[in-house]
Amino acid sequence: MKIILELKQTADGSYTLYNSELNEHYHSIHGANTESLHVFIQNGLAYLLPKILLLIK
């Protein structure tokens, strides 16, 4: 079985791979910047920041 991947441009201009056989993108279709903000800032830093501030106090 040969997997065919296509390079697709996302909403922010970055690129992701698309597997047409599975109808699946490998990363967010909104773009790398949006995905990074969601993963690392909204779900990472935003979770840890209050805990860090408590430790500083």
Image (cartoon, helix red, strand yellow):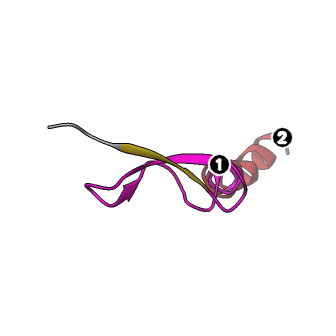
Q: Please name the residue shown 70% across and 53% down the image.
A: 37
Which residue is disc 1 drawn over?
32
Per the model, the C-alpha gap separating discs 2 and 1 is 32 Å
First to last magenta residue range: 10-37
The residue at 32%/42% (across/down) is 4
**Going by the picture, which residue comes out furthest to the left?**
1
What is the crowding at mark 2: few (fewer than 14 residues within 10 Å), some, or many (at least 20)?
A: few
Q: Position of residue 28 (x, y in %)?
A: 54, 56
Kindly state the secondary structure of the residue where label 1 is placed.
helix
For the residue pair 53 and 8, the one nearer the viewer reads as: 8
Query: Which numbered disc, 2 or 1, marks the residue that appears first in the sequence?
Result: 1
Which residue occupies 33% across, 56% down? Answer: 20
Report the disc number at residue 12: none
Residue type (three-letter) at the residue carrying disc 2: Ile
- The residue sitting at the top extreme is 2
State the image coordinates of residue 49 (x, y, percent, origin top left).
75, 50
Is residue 24 inside the magenta stretch? yes
Describe residue 16's horizontal placement relative to residue 22 as left or right: right
Q: Assess whether mark 1 and mark 2 are in contact (beta carbons under 8 angstroms).
A: no
Residue labelled with disc 2:
56
- Quarter of the image containing the C terminus? top right
Which corner quadrant of the image does residue 1 belong to?
top left
In percent of the image, x 81 and y 48: which residue is there? 53
Q: Secondary structure at mark 2?
A: helix
Q: Tell which of 36 and 8 is nearer to you.
A: 8
Q: Amino acid at mark 1?
A: Ala
- Decide: is 24 above or below 15: below
Compared to 1, does 43 lie above or below?
A: below
Queried whether the magenta region covers residue 32, the answer comes back as: yes
| Residue mark closest to the camera, 2 vs 1 | 1
Q: Position of residue 48 (x, y in %)?
A: 68, 48
- Extreme residue toward the right, this view: 57
